[in-house]
Image: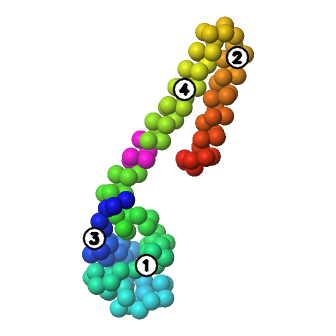
Amino acid sequence: MGEVIDINSIGNRIKQLRVNAHMTQEEMAIKLNVTRQAISNWETGKTQPDIETLHQIAIILETDINKIIYGEKQYMQATHIKSITNKTVKSGITFGTCLAMVISYVTWQSIPWAIFHGILGWFYVIYYLLKYSIS
């Protein structure tokens, strides 16, 4: 969160993405309803676009706003970390539910109680997913 963002890098990324999209500064300026000089100023790091304009740039260049701000490498690292985290959470949920069912069966020698505790575990998971908006 406290990461310093190099404004020149944002401009360089905007330029690179624009060039890769085979778009001139003039064409991009028309789509964004700004001047060609504004595009030039962003790309040279003299000024920077506001967040709403960055969002529009991302849409026009068919990319993610985070790729413009942080770059491809950091975006991919963040995506990879999120993927690993999601897999770990899913594995933990599955393991926890199975463990609850096994402990219930061993304790009460009852398959219905084991199923009940497995279902109850999923209710807790759903509650926390909704409460903390984990996707």
Q: Which residue is mark 1?
A: 50
Percent position of residue 10, x then y: 32, 72
Q: Which residue is mark 4?
A: 96
Percent position of residue 34, x then y: 45, 89
Part of the protein shown in magenta: 80-84
Q: Main secondary structure of the magenta part?
A: helix
**Count of numbered badges drawn on the protein:** 4
Residue situated in front as seen by the camera: 38 or 112: 112
Number of residues whose C-alpha sits closer than 10 Å to that of mark 2, classed few (under 14), some (14–19) or many (20 or more): some
Q: Residue at x 27, y 70 (%)?
A: 6
Contact (Cβ within 8 Å) of mark 3 with mark 1: no
Q: Residue at x 54, y 26 (%)?
A: 96
Numbered tag placed on residue 113 in the rendering: 2
Q: CA distance from mark 4 to mark 1?
A: 45 Å
Side (left or right) of 120 relative to 21:
right
Question: The disc labelled 1 sits on which kind of residue?
Answer: Asp
Q: Which residue is mark 3?
A: 6
